[in-house]
Image (tube, rainbow, N blue to C red):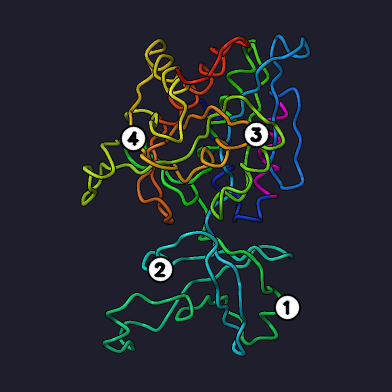
Amino acid sequence: MNETSLNFLKTLLETPSPSGYEAKIQKVVREWAGKFADEVRTDRHGNVHCVKKGSRSGQGETQKLMLAGHCDQIALMIQHIDENGFLYVQPIGGWDMQILLGQHLTVWAKDGPINGVLSRKAPHLLTNDERNKVPQFADVWVDIGAKDKKEAEGLVMNGDAITVRLGYCDLLNGLACSPGMDDKVGVWTVMEALRLVSEKNPNIDIHFVSTVQEEIGLRGATTSAQGILPQVGLAVDVTHATDTPGTDRKNLGDVKLGAGPVIHRGPNFNPKVIERMMDVARDFSIPSQIRGIPKGSGTDANAMQTVGEGVAMGLIGIPNRYMHSPVEVVSLKDLDYSAVLLAEFCLSIKPEDTWIPE
């Protein structure tokens, strides 16, 4: 990965983007895309659309391709401030409480970030019942160091979003660790593909979209696809790596970090799109993996597929260890491979291509 692209990835990962609070990260996306796209705009929902015009743009009927990666990350929201200045929160998206306990947090308040920690009673003070059950959100609190409710309310308010402490770090063998890999690496892949495509001459108009609110119901993909009405689309999201202890490969498949992007097969995906992705991977010697999903994928691809008269969909999965945790781990090689696969797929499409299954 070149240094400029790596720095863009790090900036994405260090920028907060709780579902519904994506404005900060979308500014980062717009600044990147403005160097490569013919048009960059933000819709009322907050999705950022980056358009690269095709060589036949404006010459009558042609195809539109939509690429989507969601920029939002799971987070927390302040629901109550007690008399002692402790904050009680509820989740934005799906958290494992056992992982959250003891984490350093950041409250993204109006006047600037506030440090905090998510806590409960010390182990010495827990009853046997408390020690043997997973706490609920009402059983834990966020401590920002406020001396009382008045001081806390002068700094934060109900509805403020909270993330775990953000930050990128390298691991051995080209692996990287950070919260929010889901799905900032998808946004990175889509925007890196934009950079690669901008150096070439695509045949059709391509819409590179950083979508919002995926973690609470695929909402941004729905609204952006309705605005674009593409004929064909690709979503990029993380997928579970199964190369860690205790993972059931019989149910989840065999997915490894560093072995390339995952091309998904199943009813959510158009067979011609799948075939084209596999052909591109073979023709350009891009390592790839195959995984089946026998139902809706639970990604932006699910929402995009049923827009308008139907969108011929594909899904590129980036292998990710420890999804929905503060320590998600991916391979930088997989990110590069995914961006190249995405870009070459874009460049392979001609206006006369049909995606009607046969």
Q: Quadrant of residue 263?
A: top left
Q: Residues within 10 Å of mark 1 (few under 14, many from 20)?
A: few
Residue 314: x and y, percent?
A: 48, 29
Q: Residues within 10 Å of mark 2 (few under 14, many from 20)?
A: some
Image height of 333 relative to 23, above or below: above
Counting residues from the start of the chain, the first of labels 1 and 4 encountered is 1
Q: Which residues are magenta?
A: 23-35
Disc number lying in front (4 or 2): 4
Rendered residue at 45%/17% (across/down)? 358
**Cα separation between marks 1 and 4:** 51 Å
Counting residues from the start of the chain, the first of labels 2 and 1 encountered is 2
Q: Quadrant of residue 68?
A: top right
Residue 299: x and y, percent?
A: 49, 43
Counting residues from the start of the chain, the first of labels 4 and 2 encountered is 2
Q: What secondary structure do most residues of the magenta stretch adopt? A: helix
Image height of 179 relative to 92, above or below: above
Q: Which mark is residue 308?
A: 3
Q: Which mark is residue 154?
A: 1
Which residue was labeled with disc 4? 292
Disc number lying in front (2 or 3): 3
Does the image show residue 4? no
Q: Amino acid at mark 3?
A: Gly
**Cα separation between marks 2 and 3:** 39 Å
Does the image show residue 281? yes
Q: Which mark is residue 334?
A: none
Counting residues from the start of the chain, the first of labels 3 and 4 encountered is 4
